[in-house]
Image (spheres, rainbow, N blue to C red):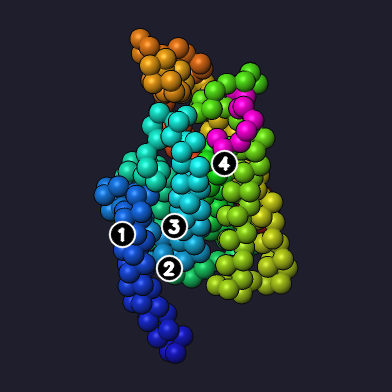
């Protein structure tokens, strides 16, 4: 009876706190120009759903959002000179918000439907499905965080990027261009997600000792997922996304034109579509890896 009462109170309080936190984050992000008005609205919905249904998944979302938003603003002057679509504060709209969170939101809601607000360990002996879903969420945010860290830190590197398909030196801002610094940043971005998932899990759930120890494997797995997601994004960008140099704007652009000299890729996918495909594949592969490992 007492335990049932606690669960009922949590079911009432958690959504209220989630709504309050989501509203604060959305308003702050809009004022800081991290999100435009549409992005702030959908950002509120995504944060609310995550925190109201699965706190640990909400933590991963917030780690991704805050670290990426901060890194986007680092070296703003340098980035504005090489990026044709650069926006002050790295302002994101509703499309970018959804493309970076829709899959994880669906996974979070599915877990909530299965186990309500109860957090679970990665343990196929208890539930293969829950392990696969949690693994998908990990992979999702490892890809998002790794790719963003790679892009935002890599462009500040003094080294010239090399096209991932040919290893030829290309201009900064070219889709598919990679640097050693950027790849290390991608791995670090994934590792931070894995570390957040593991550490926060020790506060939200009591796993059996052997299972709890095994949860540490999330960190190296997440590191690889962050790196893989970034490499996949670069590969797609180098082949299915157009990059060219505009002689008028003196910048790398993503659309062909009379004053644009092609660098690489064909004009099939835009940046949002590339992100979606790389996130989807990384989510699937990390999910399968978690089922195999745990």
Q: Earlier in the sequence, mark 2 or mark 1?
A: 1
Q: Residues within 10 Å of mark 3 (few under 14, many from 20)?
A: many
Residue drawn at (41%, 48%) of the image? 101
How far apart are labels 2 and 4 at the CA level? 38 Å
Position of residue 253 measured from the top left corner of the image (x, y, whole percent): 42, 23
Q: Which mark is residue 27?
A: 1
Q: Is the C terminus in the top left, top right, bottom left or bottom right quadrant?
A: bottom right
In the rendered structure, the answer to whether residue 37 lies left or right of residue 175 reads left
Q: Which mark is residue 108?
A: 3
Residue at which label 4 appears: 153
Q: Earlier in the sequence, mark 2 or mark 4?
A: 2
Residue at which label 2 appears: 116
Q: Secondary structure at mark 2?
A: loop
Position of residue 198 measured from the top left corner of the image (x, y, whole percent): 62, 63
Q: Are marks 4 and 3 in contact (CB under 8 Å)?
A: no
How far apart are labels 4 and 3 at the CA level? 29 Å
Specify whether residue 201 is painted magenta.
no
How far apart are labels 4 and 1 at the CA level? 26 Å
The magenta region covers 155-164
Q: Which quarter of the picture shows residue 93?
A: top left
Number of marks in the rendered image: 4
How far apart are labels 2 and 3 at the CA level? 10 Å
Is 215 situated above or below 96? below
Q: Nearer the viewer, mark 4 or mark 3?
A: 4
Q: Earlier in the sequence, mark 4 or mark 3?
A: 3
How far apart are labels 1 and 3 at the CA level? 23 Å
In the rendered structure, the answer to whether residue 223 lies left or right of residue 92 reads right
Q: Residues within 10 Å of mark 1 (few under 14, many from 20)?
A: some
């Amino acid at each position: 009876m007492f335990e049932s009462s606690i669960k009922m109170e949590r079911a009432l309080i958690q959504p209220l706190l989630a709504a309050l936190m989501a509203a604060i984050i959305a308003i702050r992000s809009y004022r800081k120009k991290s999100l435009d008005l549409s992005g702030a609205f959908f950002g509120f919905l995504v944060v609310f759903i995550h925190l109201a249904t699965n706190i640990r998944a909400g933590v991963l979302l917030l780690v991704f959002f805050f670290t990426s938003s901060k890194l986007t603003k680092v070296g703003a002057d340098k980035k504005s000179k090489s990026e044709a679509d650069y926006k002050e504060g790295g302002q994101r709209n509703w499309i970018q918000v959804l493309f970076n969170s829709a899959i994880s939101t669906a996974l979070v809601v599915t877990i909530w439907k299965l186990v309500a607000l109860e957090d679970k360990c990665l343990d196929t002996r208890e539930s293969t499905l829950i392990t696969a879903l949690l693994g998908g969420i990990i992979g999702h945010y490892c890809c998002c965080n790794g790719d963003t860290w790679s892009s935002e830190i890599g462009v500040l590197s003094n080294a010239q990027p090399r096209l991932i398909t040919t290893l030829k030196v290309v201009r900064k801002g070219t889709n598919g261009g990679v640097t050693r610094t950027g790849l290390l940043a991608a791995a670090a971005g994934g590792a931070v997600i894995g570390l957040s998932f593991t550490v926060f899990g020790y506060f939200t759930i009591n796993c059996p000792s052997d299972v709890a120890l095994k949860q540490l494997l999330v960190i190296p797995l997440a590191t690889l997922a962050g790196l893989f997601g970034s490499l996949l994004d670069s590969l797609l960008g180098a082949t299915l996304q157009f990059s060219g140099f505009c002689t008028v704007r003196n910048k790398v652009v993503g659309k062909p034109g009379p004053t644009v000299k092609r660098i690489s890729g064909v004009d099939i996918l835009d940046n949002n579509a590339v992100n979606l495909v790389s996130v989807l594949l990384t989510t699937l592969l990390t999910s399968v890896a978690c089922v195999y490992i745990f």
